[in-house]
């Protein structure tokens, strides 16, 4: 049996790779993910199960993670956050491909999946840990979020003022594993919670069937 030494095997692979590049005339022929290709957005809209579900449906979103952010406490647990004493909000970190979906489109999805008129609550969940918020990661996101909020104030189909918070993104603490992808792991319990919380009914009242 013929054995190829590791260093020789690497040299062979490198030669093949250089040949492929030279034939194509550009190094871009090697489809490697480049730095800066993906971006991060963070949103709070009440129960993170529901917010995560909304963004999982968006083409161009690479991943979603439920967690806690916006407060001073280090490494908070779900029980601590749900007690309302940490300053954190339940939130979702969205990793997305800006070539496939814009931050503006993510903002549109966010607005249509929350009640922006409810201070320190969302639907049946009450407390500042359930406040709605956009946590921007840079000046561009800040500008787009502010413009989006102003535009919504002008075009909103309801009378109540918009109270959604805009704040700079801070440390994001990943929630316990059983909270991740909850709508996939526990579809029946998730649907039952969502129904009992009146989330879809209120969204329809605010935005119509398009929500």
Image: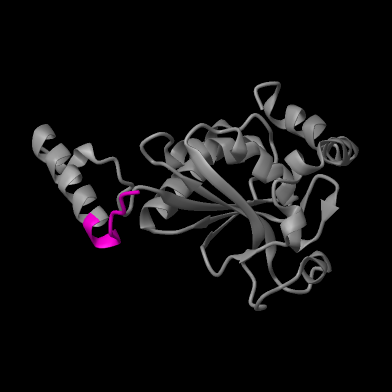
Q: Residue at x 59, y 41 (%)?
A: 110
Return the residue found at the far front. 1
Is 111 on the left or on the right of 9, as rendered?
right
Nearer to me, 38 or 203: 38
Q: Residue at x 40, y 48 (%)?
A: 38
Is 47 on the left or on the right of 5, as rendered?
right
* Residue 113 x/y as whole percent: 67, 37
Is 108 on the left or on the right of 87, as rendered?
left
Q: In the rendered structure, which segment of residues is drawn in magenta?
A: 1-8
Name the quadrant containing residue 77. Answer: bottom right
Q: Is residue 103 above or below residue 35?
A: above
Chief secondary structure of the magenta portion: loop
* Residue 9 x/y as whole percent: 26, 54
Report the quarter where the C terminus lies: top right
* Residue 41 x/y as whole percent: 50, 51
Name the quadrant containing residue 130. Answer: bottom right
Is 48 on the left or on the right of 198, as rendered?
left
Q: Residue at x 71, y 56 (%)?
A: 131
Q: Is residue 190 visible?
A: yes
* Residue 177 x/y as whole percent: 72, 58
Q: Is residue 168 magenta?
A: no
């Amino acid at each position: 049996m013929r054995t190829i030494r590791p260093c020789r095997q690497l040299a062979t692979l490198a030669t093949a790779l250089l040949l492929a590049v030279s034939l194509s005339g550009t190094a871009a022929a090697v489809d490697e993910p480049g730095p800066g290709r993906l971006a991060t957005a963070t949103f709070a809209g009440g129960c993170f199960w529901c917010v995560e579900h909304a963004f999982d449906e968006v083409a161009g979103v690479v991943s979603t993670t439920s967690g806690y952010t916006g407060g001073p406490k280090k490494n908070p647990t779900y029980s601590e956050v749900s007690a309302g004493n940490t300053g954190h909000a339940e939130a979702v970190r969205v990793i997305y491909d800006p070539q496939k979906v814009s931050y503006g489109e993510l903002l549109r999805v966010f607005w249509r999946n929350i009640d922006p008129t409810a201070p320190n609550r969302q639907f049946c969940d009450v407390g500042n840990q359930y406040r709605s918020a956009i946590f921007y990661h840079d000046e561009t996101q800040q500008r787009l979020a502010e413009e989006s909020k102003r535009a919504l104030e002008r075009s909103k189909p309801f009378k109540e003022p918009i109270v959604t918070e805009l704040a700079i993104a801070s440390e994001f603490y990943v929630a316990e594993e059983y909270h991740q992808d909850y709508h996939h792991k526990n579809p029946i319990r998730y649907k039952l919670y969502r129904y009992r919380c009146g989330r879809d009914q209120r969204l329809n009242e605010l935005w119509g069937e398009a929500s």
